[in-house]
Structures are given as structure tokens and as C-alpha cells.
Image: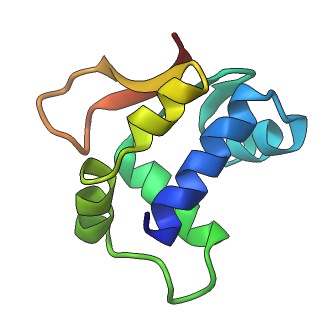
Amino acid sequence: MSPAIALLLDCCQRVLRAEPRLIGQLTAAGFVCAAGDWQFQLPALHAYLLTQLPPGSGPGYRQFLQQLYGSDLNSQLRLAGAEIALLDNQAKVSRSRYLLRRL
């Protein structure tokens, strides 16, 4: 698993555990976020993850998408009783909204 996807998994797990510090950071970064619920668009998610990785170590946006879609992120999240699902399909991956939710 790439560092960016591992960081995303960690963030998802922390949102599911309702960690107030992270939920506050995500809300301050412009995300809709509450305990067990995180809504995002992929460009904003990518930009946020880049701020959390060491400078210069994060993937470009296209590489991030390849890593994301090639990962087993949802399988890992299902073990925690959650998934990332499509919330609002705008016919373009980068314009659509996604949601971390409990199953």
C-alpha cells in the first residue's frame, strides 16, 4: 500500500473512531466531517493528504487515483464495518462526491 493510501486508511479509521482532533482538522480543511462520516471530492482529498505527507513524497493527482483504485482500501474498511461510497455522481471522478460511512 502506498504511503498516501496508508495515510487515507489511517484517517478513515480515525474518523470512524470519532477522534475529535482529526475531525476538527478535516472540518477546518473544508470537508464535511463528523464521527463516522466524511464527505469529500478526490481533488480536495488528494490536496489534504499531500499536506500530511513529507514534502515532495506525495504522488501527483493521476498517480494518486491509480493508487486509490488499485488499492484494497474498501476491503480494509469493511473489516472495520465501513466503506467509501459514491455520494453524488457528477459523471466525472474528480467532480463526484464520496462518503466514508458505516455499513
Instruction: State whether residue 100 appears in this view.
Output: no
Give the percent coordinates (x, y) of residue 45.
Answer: 48, 50
Give the percent coordinates (x, y) of residue 62.
Answer: 23, 66
Quarter residue 7 falls in: bottom right
Quarter residue 72 falls in: top left
Nearer to me, 99 or 96: 99
Q: Is residue 103 above or below residue 37?
A: above
Q: Is residue 6 above or below residue 2?
A: above
Give the percent coordinates (x, y) of residue 63.
Answer: 26, 70
In the image, what residue occupies the spot 57% across and 18% down? 81
Nearer to me, 17 or 91: 17
Q: Is residue 54 above or below residue 52?
A: below
In the image, what residue occupies the spot 22% across and 22% down? 89
Q: Residue furthest bottom?
A: 56
In the image, what residue occupies the spot 70% across and 27% down? 16
Q: Residue furthest top?
A: 103
Quarter residue 61 falls in: bottom left
Nearer to me, 71 or 51: 71
Q: Residue furthest left?
A: 91
Q: Locate the N terminus by quadrant.
A: bottom left
Q: How is the image coloured?
A: rainbow
Q: Position of 23 compared to 31: left or right? A: right
Q: How many marks?
A: 0
Instruction: State whether residue 97 appears in this view.
Output: yes
In the image, what residue occupies the spot 81% across and 27% down? 18
Q: Position of 56 compared to 93: left or right? A: right
Q: Is residue 76 above or below residue 29?
A: above
Give the percent coordinates (x, y) of residue 44.
Answer: 46, 51
Q: Residue furthest right?
A: 20
